Amino acid sequence: MKRCQNCVLPETFPGIHFDEKGVCNYCRAFNNNGKQKMQSNKERYRMHFDELCAKLIPAHNYDCIAAYSGGKDSTFTLKILVEQYKLRLLAVTVDNGFLSPHALKNIDLVSEALNIDRITVKPQFDLLREIFVAGSKNDLFPPKTLERASTICTSCMGIVKAIVLKTALKLRIPFIAYGWSPGQAPLSASIFHNNPSMIQQMQKAIQTPVRSLIGPQLDHVFLGEKDFAADYLWPYNIHPLAFLDYDEEKIVRIISEMGWNPPSDTDANSTNCLLNSYANVVHKKRHHFNPYAFEMANLVRQSYCTRAEALEKLERPESPVVIQAVKNKLYNNRDKDLPAEEE
Ligand SMILES: [Zn+2]
């Protein structure tokens, strides 16, 4: 398969074209506007976040709610917010039924090491399963979403974001933190003040297809009309890894000191979310590119990893043991429901 000579985006990626040197249009746009400005922009975002932190009101119970999956990036984000920024943190883990035992252990060890409060929310599994099974057969969301994540991941993340935002609003928490890598989400969105009209639009893109699958049964996790009209303190979304230093090896070394264990490539719990492996397989079969290609290409462009390292990650096959375990739980004696390509 033809790939960009500079990053790792393949010829199957939506909207891609290559110049005579085999470099893609995404790389050319980045080289033209992005590269030089990046460092000074990062500094600007760091200062902005410092200013917002300085304005925090001590009366609030928590300064920040953080979505916590147990992965290395969200673990490191938690540590920085607690130790460097001195924020009082509430970590929220949304259990989609596929969190690996390995991740759950890391989540516990890290929460205890950082002395933070943590809650786990586990939405009704039969409803999640309906959505994930539908996502394994068809795309459910606007085509643009497929460039950054699989349909299954987008459905799950939509629910996670709704739960975290709703909790932040009810508890009047001024910051919502995500551990996105600098490749997953742009610097320009790393400090974002939520506003009701934008949230309403974004929520609709997820909630409408979900409703068409399972009716109103998951409506309680999303914001309702009353919420959009309420006199809330609308929180800021932040993903600090976009404007702080990002070094994967260093991150793993630092968080290991809290007891966090890197996943092993050879066991069945090689990822935090086992469903993610299956979501990747489905996406690659349907769209002929890895749903992580966009993130890895961004990391290569920003020199956070080499092209060879990114390619190795993108081409590493998913564990057949994990895939089978996910299928068993998703289809649960309902082989007739298996997508055609999986039979
Ligand atoms: Zn490229």
Image (spheres, rainbow, N blue to C red):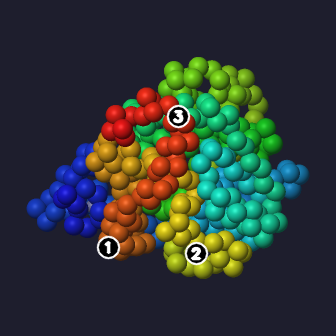
The percent position of residue 192, horizontal first and vertical second, equals 59, 49
Residue sitting farthest toward the right: 59
In the drawing, what numbered circle is on residue 308? 1
Q: Is the CB of mark 3 within 8 Å of ligand 1?
A: no
Front-most of 146 and 107? Answer: 107
SS of the residue under disc 2: helix
Check the picture and name the quadrant holding the N terminus: bottom left
- Secondary element under disc 3, as helix, strand or loop, is loop
| Front label number (1 vs 3) | 3
Circle count: 3
Residue 333 numbered mark, or none? 3
**Residue 325, image x and y in percent?**
52, 49
Residue at 86% x, 51% y is: 61
Which of marks 3 and 1 precedes in the sequence? 1
- In 3D space, how far apart are the residues under numbered discs 1 and 3 (Cα atoms)? 41 Å
Residue carrying label 2: 252
Instruction: Give the image quarter of residue 33.
Output: bottom left
**Could you tell which of marks 3 and 2 lies nearer the N-terminus?**
2
Residue 278: image tag: none
Q: Position of residue 217 (x, y in %)?
A: 65, 23
Dot 1 lies on which element?
helix
